[in-house]
Amino acid sequence: MVTVSKTWVITKYLVELIIKMVVSLPILIALVVGASLYYVFISRRKNKGKLDGKIPSGPWGLPLFGNMLQLDKTSPFLQYDKWAQKYGDIFSVTIFGTPTYVVSDPKMVKEMFSQEPAFAGRFNVGDDVPFNEFYPTSGKVHGVINTEGKDWEDIRRFTLRQLRDFGFGKSTMEGLIMEELKEVLDWMKSNEGKPLTDIKAKMTIAVVNSLWMVISGNRYKHDDPRILALSHDLTKAMEEAASDGAIVFLFPWLEKLGYKGFTSFRNYVDKMRVVFTRAVEEHKETYSADYARDFIDVFLKEVKSCKDSDSAFYKDFGERQLITVVKDLFEAGTETSSTTLSWIFLYMATFPEVQKKMQKEIDDMVGTSRLCGLSDRPSLPYVEAFIAEALRFSSIVPAGVAHRALFDVVYKGYAFPKGTAIFPNLYGIHFNPKIFTDPQSFKPERFLSPDGKTFKKHEALMPFSIGRRQCAGETLARDTLFLYTANIFQRFFVKFDPTDSNANPGLKTSASFLLTPQPYKIVLKDRLA
Ligand code: HEM
């Protein structure tokens, strides 16, 4: 009896298991299909509400992951471009769990970002990831890059006005840029003929200094280890956040399980907070209401005089805004300009005929007995065209910095529910053959008049984005790029290190939020010696 009973129990168990499997398989399939249908038909449209517009078409994604897994880790912008070719000038995807529209028509990007106030929001990747927040425990977003609404408008207006007053676009700024540049030229002379592997680090400090003088009245020595470490931390944090950190955006709880994808980003944020708080504290100790020395002083003055508790400048909140704005300017102004300069050196070495043409123009129009200044711009159209082509070809911020819809809006027949993220497909625009003929060729001539004598702007070239949130440092960046390019190549000829067969890695990019060149090795030769 005992044996029969045991067999019966085992048989019963197996039969039940098989029944369960047979029954649960369809259930499992139904669940998967149901979740996918929910994702495609409901979740992506769930915020549409009563909006009387259509959701742009786009590729299918997976429940939970959306379209994240379809994006290449190192170059997601290439996938955006492929989708743009398939689904058109505006398509929808789900990124970081957020409904996202990608816009690839330059006119539409310009109109949307300039005319429609709803699109001036900033996409926030999530409350649990300190990506947008410099004070993670405060529950508030600070600064200029990541804020939106009235605080952002007030802080941005104030910042732009004060930076202009302290020199942006003026001869004082030109003087500050030239001071750093002269030191760079001396350093290049002393390293003539030697293989140079990290031209970007040198550019970073020089570029930081002219900005830092306006912000804090100080400059760093070009070999200051503190600034080298900050720049290194920023590069590392951006690389990590763009690769392994990306998964933490999607599943913040992974960090609590020990996943380290975002650690260096957090460390970097902590260090930056210390550095910029110290700069502001030092200013407070020596502050005088009668004499504003720099941007930090004028901001402190605004905070001290602010009586409105709703204002972005009010008391401690205002001080935290100041510290974050300083960090924002440092962060946005450093890597961008130095990365573009490192592309410029690479293009010069890769296209020696372009380099010679540019040098001939400088020799003919300015000569070699004095440095080039901003007033030489109109007589150096090829230099201007080269910089425009370098900005197009490098497209270092390939999908811009994401905006988000601040409220429900229907635009050109499309429904933009509140919270929709919006990416301008800047890379796709810059490499669209209908806009820029033969876009894969490096051709400065495309930005010249037919007789080659005048620099021709192109409306679709928008490396600094466009509209209400357009780059706040564009004037400084453009002045820096012009003065560095014209003066460095007036003096030096650059080529890849002939003794190293790996000196030229080609024009592929490294993984990061910014498109950076692969490491290369160059040597400089003084043309005037
Ligand atoms: C080649 C150099 C640079 C490039 C390609 C570049 C590009 C950009 C882009 C694409 C944006 C996003 C705009 C948007 O949201 O639509 C941006 C924003 C910004 N940039 Fe730049 N940038 C450069 C240099 C600078 C410099 C030198 C500074 C500072 C002095 C700076 C400060 C900012 C700030 C503060 C923002 C945020 C504006 C806002 O959200 O209102 N940038 N930049």
Image (cartoon, rainbow, N blue to C red):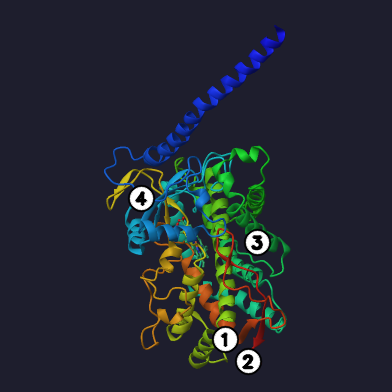
Q: Which residue is mark 2?
A: 528
Left or right: 236 in relation to 110: right
| Mark pair 2, 1: CA separation | 9 Å
Question: From this viewpoint, is residue 469 visible?
Answer: yes
Please name whichever residue, 99 or 362, is drawn nearer the observer in this view of the structure.
Answer: 99
Question: From this viewpoint, is residue 130 visible?
Answer: no
Q: Are marks 1 and 3 in contact (CB under 8 Å)?
A: no
Secondary structure at badge 4 equals loop
Q: Residue 381 appears at what percent x and percent y? A: 44, 83
* Residue 25, placed above or below residue 122: above
- Hey, what amino acid is under mark 2? Leu
Between disc 2 and disc 4, the foreground one is: 4
Q: Residue 137 appears at what percent x and percent y? A: 59, 39
- Hey, what amino acid is under mark 4? Ser
Residue at (50%, 31%) from the top-left corner?
28
Q: Residues within 10 Å of mark 2 (few under 14, many from 20)?
A: few
- Hey, what amino acid is under mark 3? Ser
Whether the residue under disc 2 has CB within 8 Å of ligand 1: no
Q: Which residue is mark 1?
A: 490
- Hey, what amino acid is under mark 1? Gln
